[in-house]
Image: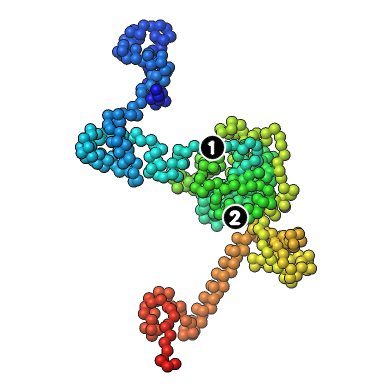
Amino acid sequence: MADNREPEMGSAEVAKRMAVLRPHLIDGVPLTRVAAGAGIPIRTARRWLARYRADGPVGLARPLRSEAGKRTFPKELVELIEGMALLKPPPSIATIYRRITGLADGRGWRTPSYGSVRSIVGGIDPAMATLAHEGAAAFRDKYELVHRHRAARPNATWQADHTQLDILILDTGGKEARPWLTTVVDDHSRAVAGYMVMLGAPSALNTSLALRQAIWRKADPAWPVCGIPDVLHVDHGSDFTSLHLEQASADLRFRLIYSGVARPQGRGKIERLFRTINTELLPELPGNLRNGKPASPPHLSLAELDAAIGAYIVSTYNVRPHRAIGVRPIEAWRGDGWLPRLPETLAELDSLLVMVTKPRTVHRDGIRFEGLRYFDPTLAAYVGEPVTIRYDPRDMGEVRVFHRNAFLCRAVSADHAGDSITLKDIQAARVAHRRRLRGEIGERKARVADFFPALVVRPAHPRAPASPLSGEAPGQPKGRRLRTYREGD
């Protein structure tokens, strides 16, 4: 017979009953004297004692009445009440009660009270109610079993993901902005291998930069995590599913595995890291967001926030015991000593992971790209030849040139030799140049209008009605006219 008691729900009551029986069980005090001293009937004390001897302390818990009300009504009536409660959207208890009472009278069933209907509805399995009312996704996230897998060794599996941090910082223009964080975590040790703090939506480049830091040796000896993973688990975001990342994974020989769409369970370990940073580190920094509003005025720059997160990862997160594995992540990653798989050089890693590839043609004045001109004396023998360039979007001062998959030279932009310019700098310069030209055009037109008003045609309002002389009704879309011919032509 199944036990319908739950000692967790009545632990205080179990302890109280044990205290009453303890003198009798341990010291041999007569049960009548124990019952009289506790102020309970002797029959109650005997019932408790019988339950204790039969089932131990669990027998002292008050039995659950999960079937209360159901045994006194026909099975068909109970199932009907439950079925109505599982409709989507679920009707109210009052609605179910009104419909059931009318049906019960017509069938000759015992009419349930409002409390009985509410008790039957309340006894429905919560998992069943969730599946019926909220759908398979909500049921999966709340009640489906989750397989907790841990990689067998360090660098066997890494996870990478993004989150928008609960903090406001100041960008280069002094405006408030909410940054993003990309992290790479080793599944076996829970150690953070690399991270990237950025403004603006996550991109493939930001992911590549976080992976670059994760893979290469760190300058800080307290952060030894490095190497190429065997498997990288990522989200289905466009930044992760880029062709650039696919090519980098093939070149570096690691396998990309995408988590299921709308299935966050597979990224639980990295999600817990994000929660830890948002709840432990960020509340100590200015500009932390609470309920969507900053608790203090923001004044950190992106570089200052980057330094704070890096210090927290190296000096706190990676070196304190992790609850899930019971040891410090750094110790778990080091293990008994092993050699991680690494690229030959940092330049090779950059060329495979960070640099973007574009096809170009060598002209007499060099290679033209993004409004800049790149030149190297080696290119003199390749005028008119197609080449491939690799460039770092963070520094557009030079490009690496390849001819038939062989490295040719480093071509430098002569106008920016020694300067570090980014693709964003170039785009901003283009916009500024257009605005300046439009402003000058406007000034000159205004000067002409002052002297020759008739020469300056002012643009018509886009919503102005068509002229009556045009033969078209206002608002009528412009289209082809029907061509007519004279008979006999």
Q: How is the image coloured?
A: rainbow
On the image, the x and y values in percent for residue 11 come to 40, 23
Whether residue 444 is situated above or below residue 140 in the rendered picture: below
Q: Quadrant of the N terminus?
A: top left
Residue nearest the viewer, comparing 376 with 247: 247
On the image, the x and y values in percent for residue 424 come to 60, 60
Residue 291 found in image quarter: top left
On the image, the x and y values in percent for residue 264 come to 51, 44
Q: Quadrant of the C terminus?
A: bottom left
Q: Amino acid under label 2?
A: Ser
Residue under numbered circle 1: 147
Q: Is residue 412 visible?
A: no
Residue at 41% x, 10% y: name it: 25
Q: Is residue 417 left or right of residue 70?
A: right
Residue under numbered circle 2: 242
Residue at 57% x, 48% y: name it: 258
What distance separates the C-alpha of mark 2 from that of mark 1? 29 Å
Residue nearest the viewer, comparing 21 with 134: 134
Whether residue 425 is situated above or below residue 478 in the rendered picture: above
Q: Amino acid under label 1?
A: His
Q: Is residue 191 left or right of residue 169?
A: right
Secondary structure at badge 2 equals: loop
On the image, the x and y values in percent for residue 326 come to 59, 31
Secondary structure at badge 1 equals: loop
**Front tag of 2 and 1:** 1
Specify which label sits upstream in the sequence, 2 or 1.
1
Q: Is residue 381 visible?
A: yes
